[in-house]
Amino acid sequence: MKKGLVMEGGAMRGMFTCGVIDVLMENDIDFDCGVGVSAGATFGVNFKSKQIGRPLRYNKIYCDDKRYASLKSLLQTGDLYNVPFCYGTLPYELDVWDTKTFYENPMEFYCVATDINTGNAVYHKCDNPNDTRRGIDIKWIRASASMPVVSNPVEIDGDMFLDGGMSDSIPLKFMESQNCDKILVIETQPIDYEKKPQKFLRLIKLKLKKYPNMINTMANRYKMYNAQKKYVRKQEAAGKAFVIRPSAPLKIGATEKNPNELQRVYDIGRKAALANLERLKEYLQIFST
């Protein structure tokens, strides 16, 4: 039996996901395959590297640090989240991402990015520990989380990428295509949430005027997202997916600066995971010895 894990993005709503995956790790629940989108990728890598508490810890420490995310960084570099700090100093010096465990763990891990020339989703398998282009996997993870307008497109092998959530926000169908028998989906919006049309389309058209396919993808994202939410509910009702989601809107800022708010949303994730733990074990056919 092949087990899959799907992690939605949502900026700092991802603290909910962090709470869920920490409970999973604490209870030795593993998966054969995982896919993360945007924050679901940046935080979700810690599931494969077995680092309980790491994303909560570094976000609480650095959320109000101007080296992490700031208007100054956006104006000077085009990236709200400072790239050298977030994808260099922090994971390799300050709160080290355990790449040894990550690459030795047989779990397959994918992140989703959007090709801005085609507007389509691209699924990258993070399995390049000895790649001569050192850091290629973290570059893909960065691309997955690069929010349009407040991030520069990320160039990889001659192509340009932005946030994977624009083209595939909840990649349940991708995980199904990996022939998984049991799939856990971690959503960061309540079951009845419905996304509205893009409010800043005029600004997006100005910022991405060279990329009409990306503009079209973003203009229609709400339709894609709402259809995905409907599909997740359908598969959940049919017993083909198990879903852990918040019961109410998380109401947290995309660039939350208050560590207490990060802790609050993380705790909601833990509570939701613990409430579903025994049913999830039964679904995954994990039995106590």
Image (cartoon, rainbow, N blue to C red):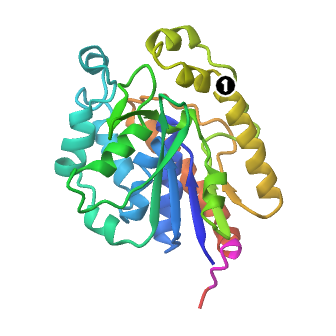
Asked if residue 266 shows in the view, the reply is no
**Horizontal side, residue 141 vs residue 17: left or right:** left
- Residue 240 position within the rendered picture, expressed as x and y whole percent measured from the top left: 75, 63
Q: Nearer the viewer, residue 216 or 262?
A: 216
Q: Secondary structure at mark 1?
A: loop
Task: Tell me the quadrant of the picture where the N terminus can be found.
Answer: bottom right
Between residue 230 and residue 271, name the one nearer to us: 230
Q: Please name the residue shown 68% across and 20% down the image.
A: 197
The C terminus sits in image quarter: bottom right
Along the horizontal axis of the image, is 250 left or right of 104? right
Residue span colored magenta = 282-287
Farthest residue, direction bottom: 289
Q: Nearer the viewer, residue 95 or 180?
A: 180
Crowding at dot 1, Cα within 10 Å, few <14 / some 14-19 / many 20+, comes out as some
Residue 203 appears in the rendering = yes
Picture quarter containing residue 193? top right
Please say if 151 is above or below 274: above
**Residue on which the image places disc 1:** 220
State the image coordinates of residue 191 (x, y, percent, origin top left): 74, 43
x, y percent for residue 95: 23, 51
Q: Position of residue 107 (x, y in %)?
A: 45, 69
Residue shown at 59% from the left, 40% from the top: 169
Q: Is residue 91 above or below residue 107?
A: above
Farthest front residue in view: 158
Using the image, determine if residue 277 lies above or below residue 258.
below
Q: Give, as a three-letter code, the residue at label 1.
A: Asn
> Magenta residues: mostly which secondary structure?
loop
